[in-house]
Amino acid sequence: MTQLDGVIKPKTKRSKRFLDKRAPKLTEDVKTTMIMKGGNASQTVTQALKDIYSLKKPNAVLYKKKNITRPFEDSTSLVSRMFDFHVLDMVELGVEKYVALSEIKNSKCPEGTKPMLVFAGEAFDTDNEHKRLKSLLIDFFRGPTVSAVRLAGLEHVLHFTALDGKIYMRSYRCVLKKSGCRTPRIELEEMGPSFDLVLRRTHLASDDLYKLAHRKPKALKAKKKKNISHNVFGTKFGRVHMQKQDLAKLQTRKMKGLRKRRGDVVAEDQDAQAPKVVKVDS
């Protein structure tokens, strides 16, 4: 490749495809997570990272070697959630209790299943650190963007509960059972892993940078259509404007049973022509 005035020009078709793949997009590709352990990681943390890798596959890479890095002291070599070459946020979570994926003997979801995320707890809506953690977890586990969802594909639930300064993460599998009607009965079956986490150190972006990172490009903003609205469930409503109608001239369907007979018409005419006598009592 040659460089001209600071702009890299591809010299071959292969290099052009590579640059096009790395170029910014209006709708970005699915993020690939790099999972690595530190220099003093215990066996529990190592196994926990393997289970998180199992939940993220195939959109993740697991590094088995130890990495001597201290991101809160020096983030220059850190691979984290970034925006415009700035570290957007870092959160340190301590594992107080952990149940491995292999210890729960129930059936598991297939690899690559897009999970449904559930957040419970007032802290996720009121506390700033918990709100940023919620955003980070959604970005981490959301998976690919899909245009349609089938009922049988909704089989993995990740539940996060914030209570008494701790965060409880549970993983469930949705089991569809017969209910006697068309809609099946749904039961949740824990499949692991299970975490009891505590929030430790955080490094959060400023409000201005965080707001800038969430700004949507103008090309992605939906154009407002006149007289069309949606409710909270996504149902589309349209308003149609019509001229005022005269109901007296409204043409209705004629039925044979409502037609007047010829004899009835003659009798009505004779009654109309007959003089009417009004008796007045003195």
Image (tube, rainbow, N blue to C red):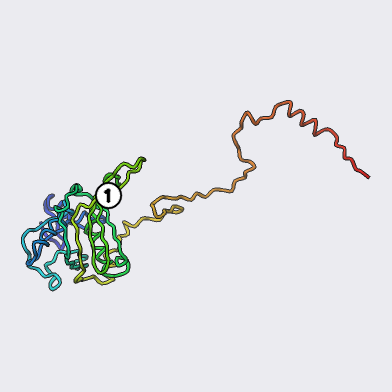
Check disc 1 and give the amino acid type: Val
Q: What residue sits 23% from the left and 57% below the top?
A: 170
Specify whether 151 is left or right of 55.
right
Considering depth in this image, is 132 or 144 the residue closer to the camera? 132
Considering depth in this image, is 278 or 167 the residue closer to the camera? 167
Q: Quadrant of the N terminus?
A: bottom left
Identify the secondary structure beneath mark 1: loop
| Residue 258 screen position, x and y as percent | 65, 31
**What is the quadrant of residue 232 in the picture?**
bottom left
Seen as rendered, the residue at the extreme bottom is: 73
Specify whether 210 is left or right of 70.
right
Name the residue that disc number 1 marks.
146
Specify whether 228 is left or right of 143.
right
Considering depth in this image, is 11 or 205 the residue closer to the camera? 205
Q: What residue sits 29% from the left and 43% below the top?
A: 177
Considering depth in this image, is 4 or 191 the residue closer to the camera? 191
Q: What residue sits 28% from the left and 63% below the top?
A: 214
Seen as rendered, the residue at the extreme right is: 282
**What is the quadrant of residue 101 in the picture?**
bottom left
| Residue 96 screen position, x and y as percent | 17, 65
| Residue 207 screen position, x and y as percent | 28, 71
Label 1 Cα crowd, 10 Å radius (few <14 / some 14-19 / many 20+): few
| Residue 186 screen position, x and y as percent | 30, 47
Count the marks: how many? 1
Q: Quadrant of the C terminus?
A: top right
Seen as rendered, the residue at the extreme top is: 263
